Image (cartoon, rainbow, N blue to C red):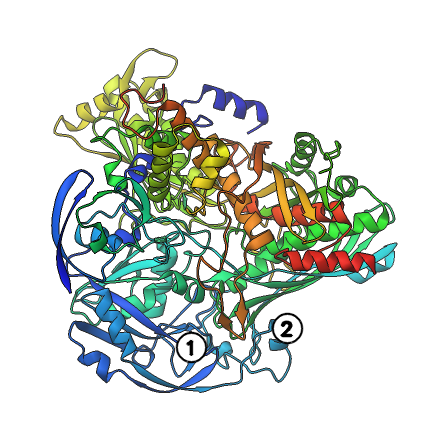
């Protein structure tokens, strides 16, 4: 698809590219929308969990007798009764701790009772004796010989093909990229710079905490309701853990109050299923409290990123070596994938011929690191964009110029060996951001010499995990209206509305004649997951294929009715017509003439797998095509720094994104505005504090996310480089929205003060320390 | 101890028994199935549980049900007139102020209280009024736009012609 045909399509469109209100908004503003937290099932019991107070300990004994004796308690379960392990890349986690605990907050005992109050009371009646074990909290120390090994059985765990831990160590995965000759590259460079960057623990803080319910049938079949991002991840991981056939595990995605990666893999579900196996069919519901959300859900990995970059005098990058360490806590969860994915963005959107990256995912006795919007890429972006500015200043080159000199264009190849052949809008994002921010016009001074202003920019790229698959069913009722069945979950990002727009567009229907069914693994077909900014592209294409299939079937029914061969009819405008002629039947007429007025439905199915994508080689990270698409963004931040207090105030952020064609403009702006604010939180104020494995600020009172008074003006713009394989040219958007924000702010602080902060979050203390360093 | 309580909820008289320690949100959500009121912290910090008690925005997770004896409670379910959205609700729909929607009930109630006391707030006043209501999805800008749009359209009362 080239530019002109795309824009023509959008111009002719009824639904795509139009301002469309999200379909669930009225339900949500009236309080009628049902979230996981609102779930109420007949006979439902409530669960509570006893969690380990120690980061690393042996469980000596557990006495549950007093809890079991409490009136209203219906089930009590401990890890010794549960032989199973679960995990997505690496099956390393028991349903409840078995023999030892590996982080403070690990579930040890679960109890189901008739009310939450009774369950809570019963938890207080459980006695557990622990014997503390030597613990390790720093991931770099955890990699050293002699460190306590958290998972002596690492080598025996089931692993998904690509991933590999190092047996006998705490390294849960070691991802590599090898391209060109990095040593020669350093020799060919005029300068080689080595810098270290670090990031902190960030919690997702979805307003709805994790919640699920489970029910077990007489034959052992399991039904799970979960406020989750991926019913099919859950079917796979639960079935694999329990050894149950997939058809006997049903996962229903409830309405969900935010996810941001935190609800991508099993968390509350395994122990809830274990309880439900002991309640004679009564469903069990388990909801995290907010403090459990901090200590017992997952968090964004803190990362330690060492960047060594060789450049020519003119700023051309010749070589880069990265060693990054991701602290994944007591269990792997998404850690192996996150650390690997971070490596794929290590070069930034720049041409670098010689690259060597080693990215480690390391166990420690800390909370579990999981998927978080951006999946390791914000950490990489923080490092490469901070260093890009540092190199520019060391060489005396303009920060914009050094980026212009190195940016990738069509025809360039990534560090993973993929030649980019479509939709590389990164240069446009940079140029548009420069223009829209009036980058060259200096900021007006504050008038107070102790409060200075500055401007900084950062750019980025991100892939989406590939190949992954999406499938969709469309069902047309006899009146010509359509119901879409898809397992993409609307987390608030608006995918349900976008998919309805695509169906309406493709089938020529009014938007209100397209409904979408809730994701349910017993009904809606496979989707890998709602993550990685993949849904519009993958599910959008699957939906288009399903619509084409439906249209084909309608054509087959219509041809005899129209008295011509099937090759002479075409689907158009909500019905079938003779090619080049006026004769036309509506879908309703076709179905009723074919099946009678008592009715029938006509169906279409579609699947999408991004063509030619190949997983990277395990030892080199190389593949001819790494990703279904690459997303790009550039942010420009204007800041004000108080030289006395170190306080940073962000005045404005200009965020320019290349997400391909924008299908829902309002939704797209919403993704960027929300993403930038999350990015600012992680830049300036958010940090989950973990002292010797113990979270010390597990509440909204102590862990501060941005409020309505903390956010600056945000200008969000799109450059729309259409993707040849995207539905109507679309790619993805959600994750990049928060990645360049942090380095843009750090670069702006440098621009204002000459002080460089290399560790997130940028607290006033760090700013003051960096200011002091500039005076030394 | 358990008490017999009577109060008006969304304009309807309600009578029920509740133990002294039970909070208003527990009674609303668990006993009366008014689940539109959300809870994201139960510690008085996030604002998602905000309801009106005698016209004042309060956090229902901190408010004991017994303290509402004889009072009038309005939850998100009480903002629309039947199926007709209030100007504020309509503005939220139109401004893209709803993403996951988990903060929306509390935001609507807090904004309704604001527009009652200050029908034409400035942007800064809107932001200040919503500072105790956390949203993790939208970045607040569309919510603020919605409240300003509703104030122009005529506060939080149900309106006949919306979007005009
Ligand atoms: S639930 Fe009441 S303020 Fe958070
Ligand atoms: S819309 Fe999700 S928390 Fe506000």
Residue A85 x, y percent position in the rendering: 39, 73
Q: Say how many tags the image has.
A: 2
Q: Nearer the viewer, residue B139 or A418?
A: B139
The C terminus of chain A, quarter of image: bottom right
Q: CA distance from mark 2 to mark 1?
A: 24 Å
Q: For mark 2, does the 10 Å Cα neighbourhood hold few (<14), some (14 to 19), or many (20 or more) residues?
A: some
Q: Quadrant of residue A617?
A: bottom right
Q: Nearer the viewer, residue A335 or B153?
A: B153
Apparent side of residue B131 relative to residue A357 in the rendered image (left or right): left
The N terminus of chain A, quarter of image: top right
Q: Chain of mark 2?
A: A
Q: Is residue A719 above or below residue A589?
A: below
Q: Look at discs 2 and 1 and give the one toward the viewer.
A: 1
Q: Residue at x 25, y 22 (%)?
A: A560
Q: Are marks 2 and 1 in contact (CB under 8 Å)?
A: no
Q: Quadrant of residue A145?
A: bottom right
Residue A655 x, y percent position in the rendering: 60, 38
The residue identified by callout 1 is A53
Q: Residue at x 29, y 69 (%)?
A: A48
Q: Which mark is residue A140?
A: 2
């Amino acid at each position: 698809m080239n530019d002109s045909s795309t824009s023509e399509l959008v111009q002719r469109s009824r639904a795509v590219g139009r301002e469309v209100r999200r379909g669930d908004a009225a339900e949500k503003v009236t309080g009628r929308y049902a979230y996981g937290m609102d779930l109420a099932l007949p006979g439902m019991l409530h669960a509570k969990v006893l969690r380990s107070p120690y980061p690393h300990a042996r469980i000596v004994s557990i006495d549950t007798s007093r809890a079991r004796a409490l009136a209203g308690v219906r089930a009590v379960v401990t890890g010794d009764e549960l032989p199973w392990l679960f995990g997505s890349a690496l099956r390393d986690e028991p349903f409840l701790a078995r023999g030892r605990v590996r982080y403070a907050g690990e579930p040890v005992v679960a109890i189901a009772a008739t009310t939450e109050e009774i369950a809570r009371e019963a938890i207080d009646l459980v006695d557990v004796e622990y014997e503390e074990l030597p613990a390790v909290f720093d991931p770099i120390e955890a990699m050293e010989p002699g460190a306590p090994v958290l998972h002596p059985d690492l080598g025996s765990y089931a692993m998904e093909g690509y991933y590999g831990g190092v047996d006998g160590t705490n390294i849960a995965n070691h991802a590599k990229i090898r391209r060109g000759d990095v040593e020669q590259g350093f020799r060919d460079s005029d300068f080689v710079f080595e810098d270290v960057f670090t990031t902190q623990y960030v919690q997702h803080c979805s307003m709805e905490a994790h919640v699920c319910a489970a029910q077990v049938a007489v034959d052992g079949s399991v039904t799970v309701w979960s406020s989750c991002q991926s019913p099919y991840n859950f079917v796979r991981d639960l079935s694999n853990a329990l050894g149950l056939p997939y058809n006997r595990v049903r996962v229903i995605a409830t309405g969900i109050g935010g996810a941001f990666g935190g609800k991508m893999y099993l968390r509350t579900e395994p122990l809830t299923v274990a309880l439900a196996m002991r309640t004679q069919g009564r469903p069990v519901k388990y909801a995290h409290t907010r403090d459990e959300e901090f200590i017992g859900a997952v968090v964004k990995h803190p990362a330690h990123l060492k960047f060594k970059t060789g450049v020519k005098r003119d700023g051309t990058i010749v070589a880069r070596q990265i060693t990054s360490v991701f602290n994944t806590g007591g269990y792997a969860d998404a850690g192996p994938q996150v650390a690997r994915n971070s490596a794929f963005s290590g070069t930034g959107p720049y041409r670098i011929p010689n690259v060597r990256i080693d990215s480690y995912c390391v166990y420690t006795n800390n909370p579990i690191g999981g998927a978080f919007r951006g999946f390791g890429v914000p950490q990489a972006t923080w490092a490469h964009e901070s260093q890009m500015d540092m190199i520019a200043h060391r060489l005396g080159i303009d920060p914009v110029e050094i980026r212009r000199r190195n940016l990738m264009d069509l025809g360039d190849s990534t560090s993973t060996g993929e030649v980019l052949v479509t939709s590389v809008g990164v240069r446009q994002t940079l140029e548009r951001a420069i223009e829209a921010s009036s980058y060259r016009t200096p900021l007006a001074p504050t008038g107070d010499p102790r409060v200075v202003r500055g401007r900084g920019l950062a750019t980025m790229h991100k892939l989406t995990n590939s190949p992954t698959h999406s499938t969709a069913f469309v069902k047309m009722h006899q009146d010509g209206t359509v119901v879409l069945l898809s397992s993409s979950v609307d987390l608030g990002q608006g995918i349900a509305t976008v998919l309805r727009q695509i169906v309406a567009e493709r089938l020529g229907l009014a938007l209100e004649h397209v409904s979408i069914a809730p994701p349910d693994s017993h009904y809606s077909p496979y989707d890998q997951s709602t993550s990685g900014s993949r849904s519009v592209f993958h599910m959008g294409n699957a939906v288009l294929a399903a619509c084409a299939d439906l249209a084909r079937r309608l054509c087959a029914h219509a041809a005899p009715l129209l008295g011509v061969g099937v090759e002479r009819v075409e689907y158009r405008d909500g019905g079938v017509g003779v090619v080049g002629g006026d004769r036309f039947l509506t879908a309703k007429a076709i179905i009723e003439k074919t099946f009678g007025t008592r009715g029938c439905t006509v169906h279409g199915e579609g699947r999408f797998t991004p063509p030619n994508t190949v997983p990277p080689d395990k030892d080199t990270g190389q593949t001819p095509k790494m990703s279904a698409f690459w997303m790009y963004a550039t942010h420009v931040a204007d800041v004000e720094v108080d030289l006395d207090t170190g306080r940073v105030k962000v005045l404005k952020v200009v965020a320019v994104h290349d997400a391909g064609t924008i299908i829902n403009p309002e939704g797209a702006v919403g993704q960027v505005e929300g993403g930038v604010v999350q990015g600012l939180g992680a830049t300036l104020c958010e940090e989950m504090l973990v002292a010797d494995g113990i979270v010390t600020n597990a509440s909204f009172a102590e862990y501060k996310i941005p409020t309505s008074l903390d956010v600056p003006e945000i200008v969000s713009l799109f450059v729309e480089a259409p993707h040849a394989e995207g539905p109507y040219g679309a790619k993805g958007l959600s994750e990049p929205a928060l990645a360049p924000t942090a380095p843009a702010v750090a670069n702006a602080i440098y621009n204002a003060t000459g002080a460089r902060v290399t560790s997130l979050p940028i607290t006033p203390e760090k700013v003051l320390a960096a200011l002091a360093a500039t005076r030394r | 101890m358990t008490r017999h309580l009577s109060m008006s909820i969304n304009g309807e008289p309600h009578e029920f028994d509740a133990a002294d320690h039970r909070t208003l949100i527990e009674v609303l959500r668990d006993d009366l199935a008014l689940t539109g009121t959300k809870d994201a912290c139960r510690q008085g910090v996030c604002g998602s549980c905000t309801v009106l008690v005698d016209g004042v925005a309060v956090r229902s997770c901190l408010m004991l049900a017994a303290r509402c004896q004889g009072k009038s409670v309005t939850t998100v379910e009480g903002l629309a007139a039947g199926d007709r959205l209030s100007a504020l609700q309509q503005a939220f729909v139109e401004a893209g102020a709803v993403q996951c929607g988990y903060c929306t009930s509390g935001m609507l109630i807090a904004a309704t209280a604001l527009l009652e006391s200050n029908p034409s707030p400035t942007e800064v006043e809107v932001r200040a009024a919503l500072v105790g209501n956390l949203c993790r999805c939208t970045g607040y800008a569309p919510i603020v736009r919605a409240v300003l749009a509703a104030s122009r359209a005529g506060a939080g009362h149900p309106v006949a012609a919306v979007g005009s």
